[in-house]
Amino acid sequence: MDILNMMMGQGVVSTLADQLHNLFMLLFDNAVVAGFLMKCVGIGAILGIISVAAIVFTYGERKVCAFMQVRIGPNRVGGRFGLLQPIADMLKLMSKEDIIPQGCDRVVWALGPMLLFVPTALIYAFFPFDNGVALADVNVGIFLMLAISSQAVLPFLISGYASNSKYAFIGGMRTVAQMLSYEAPMVFSLLGVVMLSGSMRMSDIVNAQSEQLWFILMQPIAFVVFVISATAETNRVPFDLVEGEAEIVAGPFAEYSGMRWALFFLAEYANLLSVSILTTVFFLGGWNGPFLPGVVWFGLKVLAMVFVFMWFRWTFPRTRIDQMLAFSWKILLPLALVNVLFTGVGIYARQWM
Amino acid sequence: MPKTETYTLSMGPQHPSTHGVLQVRLDLDGENILKATPYMGYLHRGIEKLLESRTYIQGVPYTDRLDYVSSMNNNLGYCRAVEELAQIEVPERAEYIRVIVAELNRIASHLVFIGSLANDLGAVTGMIYAFRDREKILDLFDLVCGARMTFHYIRVGGVSADLPPEFAAKCDEFLKIVPEFMQEYEDILTGNEILQHRLHGTSPMTKEQALSHNMTGPNIRAVGIPFDIRKVDGYGLYPKFEFDVPVGENGDNWDRYRVRYQEIYESAKIIRQALDGLPEGDIMAKFPKVLRPPKGEVFSRTEGTRGELGFYIVSDGSTKPYRVHIRRPSFINLQGLDDMCRGMLIGDSVAAFSAIDPLMGEVDC
């Protein structure tokens, strides 16, 4: 019972981590080695989360899509619910021929999907999965996260450029326009959150929400702006102009096949997970919640957000490039700025009262 | 000033949204379309020539393959032309059945239009919904003639089989759910602001442009000209039925969408009236097994789902037509693509293409 209480208080994951750390101390009797090993375990865990998420989300996306479209979805491989479908998909992708298009810039072309995965995975370091569980809980977490995630533009552009295909190139150019313009409202919507919590450290933001209200209630406009711009950042419908299946076939991915394409796919789902985590951390109170352990609450909220993003994808049509950019600069950005203004006024007013 | 260059993008023949095998060469300046040139012929099967080497009656199944989404209307067009040529009087019951199946097929075809428009605009779910409801019509056709596509049901002189006894009830059931599923599209597609932004004001056409391209069908009605051959010529039983010809105002993609949307209701109205007035009687005219129409020529036009479907047949008095020419509405409507795309963006070209609603089987013939 004691252990349970302790786990509830401190969080399951950090208790486990502490015990693992003690084990390493016992084995090696060296704080530096144990610390290094703990970091390795953390990195492994994050990569594991991303891979598992990709597997679960491929299945989940197909089932959610089927649910939206009054279909059944995967139901052949692995029983009535098609539970082994992601494995079958993976086998299919791995056994595919690796086609290298003629006239492409081979080095850059091959680098594209790998480079895309780097910023996508790197920002997981800052996420607080539970109380005290973050690989690097730095004090400029939001800033660093935004800086790193904006690097994801480049791999899209270089793979679009290096493919030597016009569809891919148009897709690459669209990525730049889209991601850069949605970065701005996203940052400004987060500014309100930072102003309320007074910190850029992600765990502080979650703690601030347990002291005050969840920020979805205090910052509803910021929440809406953030979710919309996050959808655009992850290139999902209604902002999937980068892929734009009906127009530019698959955009930057058009010339990739097999595992190279699977890397794009992996990055897409890792992005989906990371924006869901960010929404949870900034607006839905992170790991806070009654009765259940923090990490469970965290997971539930994240999955709910993932479902919302999938819901968008299977409901909306695609926007057009000019409308999408106009929406960002003319509607979302002013809205986010107004939100920042009113948040500031509100904070001042509260201090006066 | 940075130097800019125009470039050419070849859309198709293998492209997700060219509805078959069509190549559109887009001359682009960035994302702006300067010129769109459709190149067709990838699906050419020489149907006109094939019809000339078969007897009149053997020709009917080939017309199924023209516009394979609305085969009934093609059967009807061809059979009407042959009947006019050979002066065959079609029994009234057969005429009623023809109207019922042709209008059912019009609904099915317009559902495919709504579905593929939604798909091309990125709303995959909208497509599935439209195709789900089209299934019900295909099931009805299955009941009537045993086939879900390429029916070969309407024959020269009548129809191949009488309606099965349960058809009336099943068709009635379908007509009852028409407003229901139409409301669903209204909710998921029409009411969606993104879709409205994509369709309002894109690819507008003036009346003069549409007329100069000789556009017909929903495309000409979208610019505001109420040209419907069912009304203009009043062929078959259509003068007996009450229905409206929905027209658009601005001739943009939105109007093209709405016109077809309304036409589904109008077709349902016609089917309802035809079902109620269905007389008893023969379903096949009596005429010699070996059909030898007298020397002469005929041009017979009907309102296909995509526009004016005309069959020009020259007879030399033998069992086979001497010459057949088909006026394919898709082919002629497609000529408007350039006018519709100029000054638009790449995304609009897909919407414009969908809004014309050409079917490559008919375009290439």
Image: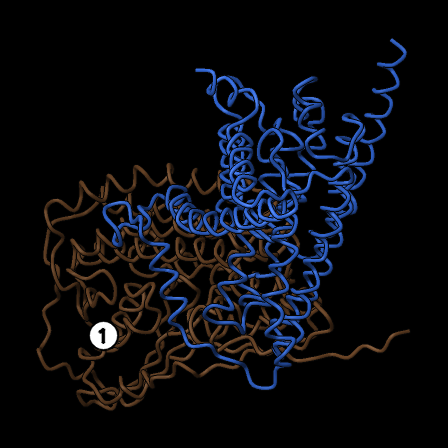
Residue at the spot 65% in from the left edge and 22% down from the top edge: A214
Name the residue tied to disc 1. B60
B45 with respect to A106 (left or right): left
Q: Quadrant of residue A255?
A: bottom right
- Residue A4 on image: x %, y %: 46, 20
Q: Name the tint of chain B in the rendering.
A: brown
Q: Quadrant of residue B109?
A: bottom left
- Residue B304 on image: x %, y %: 38, 64
The residue lying toward the viewer, choosing from B365 and B7, is: B7
- Residue A325 on image: x %, y %: 73, 52
User: Which residue reaches farthest top?
Assistant: A353
A216 to A92, vertically: above or below: above
Tell me if I can see residue B199 in this picture. no
A276 to A4, vertically: above or below: below
Disc 1 marks a residue whose amino acid type is Val
The chain containing the residue under callout 1 comes to: B
Q: Name the tint of chain A in the rendering.
A: blue
